[in-house]
Amino acid sequence: MANLLLILLIIPLLGCLFTMAAKKNDVNAFYVVLFTIASNIAVVLRLLQAVAANTDGTAEYYTYTWLKSLNIELSFGADLFSLLLLFGVYMALLIGVVGLLPQQRKHKSLLLLTLYFMWNITGFLTARDMFSFYIFFAAMVLPLLMLVGMFGNVRKVSVLYVHFSLSLVGALVLLIAVLVMYRFNHGNAELLSVALVAMPKYAAFVVWVCVCAAFLSRIPIWPFHHWFAAISAGIKNPPVYIIANLMPLTGLYGFMRFWQLTVPESAEAFLPIMTIFGVATMLFAALIGISHKDFLPKLFSYSAVYYLLFLLCIVLLDSQYEKNIAYSLFIFLIVNASLTVLDLWSENACAEGHCDYRGILAYMPKLSRIFAFFVLVAVGLPISSMFWNNFVLISALFKINFAAGIGVMTAITLICMGVTYELFMMRSLKRIGVNVSVEDISDRQRAFFMAVVLLLFLSFFDPLWFVLS
Amino acid sequence: MIEGLIYFSPMLILLIAVFILMFGEHEEDEQYRCFRFSRIMLLSSFVLEVIFYNKPSILTLSQGTRFTLVFESLLYGSGLMLLYLSRKWFTAMHRQAYIFCGCLFLTLMFGSLLVSSTNLGLTVGCAVMLMSGNYIILRDSNTQKDSNISSRIYLISSLFCALLLTGAAVILRLLCGSLDYEALRMYFDLNQSDIRLFAAAAMLIVPFLFLTGLAPMHFWLTETFGRMMLPVFVYFVLMSGTGGWGGFIHLNIAVLAPLAAYFKIFYVSVALLSIGVGAVGACGGQNIRKIFAYIAVYNAGIILLTVRRFTVNALNAGFGYMFTYLLAMCGICTCLFGLKRKGEYLFMLSEFEGASQKRPYISAMMVIFMFSLLGLPPFSGFLGLFSALNYQALHHHFYQLIYLLIMMLVVGYAFLQIVRALYFEERKTTFDKADSGIYTAILLNAVLMLLIMILPQYLTEDVRTMLETVLQ
């Protein structure tokens, strides 16, 4: 299994090399990326099988002695949580790459950066010690900057500057925390035992403030929410939008790993503040989502609300809910990516057909059915495992903090109403001209999304149905 | 005698090369021959230096050790890279390169001697010759009025530094009766409270701050870089400072160690000032070479902040940082050689706009080298930065650590401006085709960076062993 982890890390790098070597203005690079993602999905499925077979739920580790004199060993490993997230991320990237328009498929730099990001997130989600975790956490700054800067249609350069600075600040404060922990632990520490590193009180306070700031800087919580919205607003490129939207996942995962066993004493004081800010931002994002007239901003608000829900679950609930969070996040990532691609396709069809965006789905029946399914999954209807798991998580939140539960439930209800209303408007025949010719999705695209629909639907019966026993 | 002469052969080769290049008669348009000759001489000198690094030569005032070998390797490596890249420039511009190559050998020779010197007289002589070499190379490269002024500024500053060095040597000779490092160290040990010794030590330190480009003696570096011809820019970035660092560190270990506690605050102040000036200065520039000149000041500050205790750990961390910095800077310089328009090498940020559309590989590598210089993982610069930051954390210098990280953020902003010009702006002009040599150099640099990142023990542990042997 250790070799499989290494393969998981090497495949995207090989993909990068092949993409670089591909011809300019050709689709070869696009196929390389598809193949790379598909290969990594196959490896993840094999690892999931191994993890499911293990009684303790963990796969074997892969360690590499990096700096012997400084007592730094980089170690990688995977448990059910990280593997499900990896599967979800790969699926999201696959959906994003499939969603590229024909002319976008020839952008070598876009495809190369997508693969490079994939390598970073693979390393990040499989990191088992604080150094490898930091390396991949900080490494994501570069591909994100380049993707958003080159393909994000960011109108104001200042927005890009602030977003980059925010990411860099996040990476630097985490570096401070890692260095201080390294100092007191006399070496590298496993992520599982990071919260148990013995430190003086003042040092522990500094460390946990830095850790919280680093992870929160990646999550659309107040006061960072504005910059995420500003960056996402102009993106019309599926993989770029999906990658920008995956960044909060890195913050969530950070909290999950650093506080897996216990919330450190020094960090306990932050929990009420985080809860208040989290719930308030959820409500705010939901209201903003309702006020928007397009689907994509609504989807952004939806993802912000859900990311904050997961954040609250991670910081407030016990580790027994870890699996529920993983199952729910897995579905959420796929649904979010699928809706992004489908919406961008319909927007593109509008642009080509010179018609109003609202009502477009009435002229695209194939896309409409798939779109409707994903919206219904997103709002939490009982057609995927998200229904069960969200039910469990929200109930637990109510049990822990009733007021927070009410706030969370209100925000989710509001944003789900907003998304459903937008679906209704997009299907409304009244909004579009009669003599409009709009091309529906191709059979290939339909088949691809039907497979994704099947994956989600079967998860309603067994969240891990795709793991062969 | 003959044995001593053989062991002195690396220096002799350099000396012969200097004489042939600077004082020989040459035909015009012979750049290729000049660079081939320089390359052969440099390589043979390097090979002999590695073989005889610790053998006693006829020059009894210097003694090679593993420590000197480490710095000499950096100097020779940078020299080779510089020769390789500069040939392209001189050939394209049809300019004579004899003075340039001669000065390069002068720097190599006196830089090496400066690192291995065991006598203050020799140190002073080498430092003065190093500054003279720098001045000649600056004067030779002058093509415009403003660069003429900057070379005069350099001349005046270096004369002042030479006077300081000579003054210090005279004071110490009068006080101690000898300029030998061991005798001087003993004298410093016994007379720590003598104010005249402090004055002499300060007079020794200031010229080295000037040579290494540390603030507030950095003005020449940032002022002269703007419109300087590209090979000279690379020479100052890669070579001039390295020789200065070797000599400065050696002087502190061998002579000034008893006063280390007194100079600690001074070094920290200079380092923090350099970091601040470098980072803030880099943000305000529109001239890419000036930006990197400020980055050089910023990096010199980090190196001083790291090595200021002159212990094995400090030197190990400082050397790690210096090596990764030089590697990244080397890559950036190569990229600058690869980006030109109508035969002209570019220097204003606006001229680089949209370069990625025409020269995607060079632009991509330039971004990677810049992020490595910034210390972001997974590039090799992270290793150097980690060594430097970890050293601060180990000694509980948390305020300095935070200051350093804030300045890193400021430098990040400066780099973002370059990234914006390369990638996010529309291309307005065309770029010349870069030859395969540039791509080869970039590839080699990238492979070296990759190896350092995957196998860092060669940089950290092996160098540490070398330093330990010397410092014991």
Image (cartoon, coloured by chain):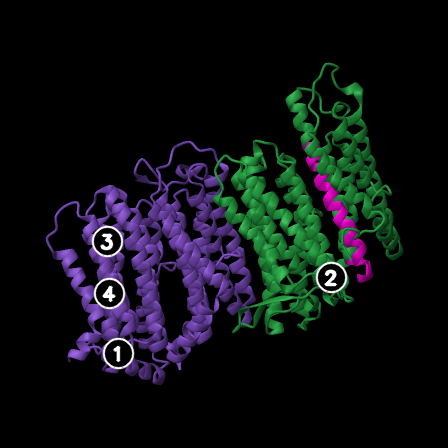
Chain colours: A green, B purple
Question: What distance separates the C-alpha of mark 2 from that of mark 3?
Answer: 65 Å
Quadrant of residue B465 in the image? bottom left
Q: CA distance from mark 1 to mark 3?
A: 32 Å
Q: Which residues are magenta?
A: A315-344
Q: Secondary structure at mark 4?
A: helix
The residue that label 3 is drawn on is: B137
| Dot placed on the residue nearer the N-terminal end, 1 or 3 | 1
Q: Three-letter amino acid code at disc 4?
A: Ser
Tag 3: residue type?
Ile
* Disc 4 target residue: B44
Nearest to the eye among marks 4 and 2: give it.
2
Q: Disc 2 marks which amino acid?
A: Val
Task: Answer whether residue A331 is magenta in the image.
Answer: yes
Which residue is found at the position 60% from the left and 60% from the top?
A6
Closer to us: A421 or B40: B40
Task: Judge depth for marks 1 and 3 and give the one in front.
Answer: 1
Query: In what element is the residue under mark 2?
Result: helix
Mark 3 secondary-structure assignment = helix
Residue on which the image places disc 1: B55
Query: x, y (%) of residue B250?
Result: 34, 73
The residue indicated by pointer 2 is: A51
